[in-house]
Amino acid sequence: MSSTYCGNSSAKMSVNEVSSFSLTLEQKTGFAFVGILCIFLGLLIIRCFKILLDPYSSMPSSTWEDEVEEFDKGTFEYALA
């Protein structure tokens, strides 16, 4: 185990060697897709925290039971009564 072997030869790369490691189209597409997914995830997290902090602001003013009562008025049983 020689200490001269532990030298960092990869840090001494020339400009031509660095430019040869450019990304392919598939890699660029993959990074773009992952980036879009991260942005989408961030927006969903922000929206969920807004709903958690103020849950009643996102609810509509009418309830489902009000709509059911209006629907029941036109049914056959209501016409018989």
Image: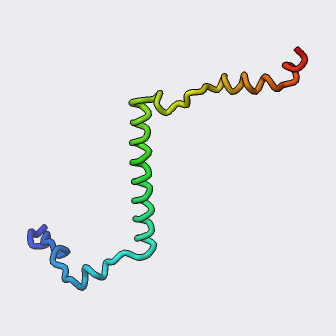
Q: Is residue 42 left or right of residue 66?
A: left
The answer to whether 41 is drawn above or below residue 68 in the figure is below
Instruction: Where is residue 56? Give x, y as percent.
Output: 47, 27
Residue positioned 88% across, 14% down in the render: 81
Q: Nearer the viewer, residue 58 or 17?
A: 58
Image quarter of the N terminus: bottom left
Residue positioned 72% across, 22% down in the render: 69
Residue 39 occupies quadrant: bottom left
Q: Is residue 8 left or right of residue 24?
A: left
Color theme of the render = rainbow
Q: Residue furthest top?
A: 81
Q: Is residue 67 left or right of residue 77?
A: left
Residue 53 occupies quadrant: top left
Residue 64 occupies quadrant: top right
Q: How many marks?
A: 0
Q: Nearer the viewer, residue 36 or 3?
A: 36
Residue positioned 17% across, 73% down in the render: 11
The answer to whether 50 is drawn above or below residue 67 in the figure is below
Q: Nearer the viewer, residue 31 or 40?
A: 40
Q: Residue furthest bottom?
A: 16
Instruction: Where is residue 24? Give x, y as percent.
Output: 41, 76
Instruction: Where is residue 5? Give x, y as percent.
Output: 13, 72
Q: Residue furthest left?
A: 3
Q: Nearer the viewer, residue 53 or 35?
A: 53
Q: Residue furthest right?
A: 80
Instruction: Where is residue 62? Give x, y as percent.
Output: 60, 27
Q: Is residue 39 left or right of residue 16?
A: right
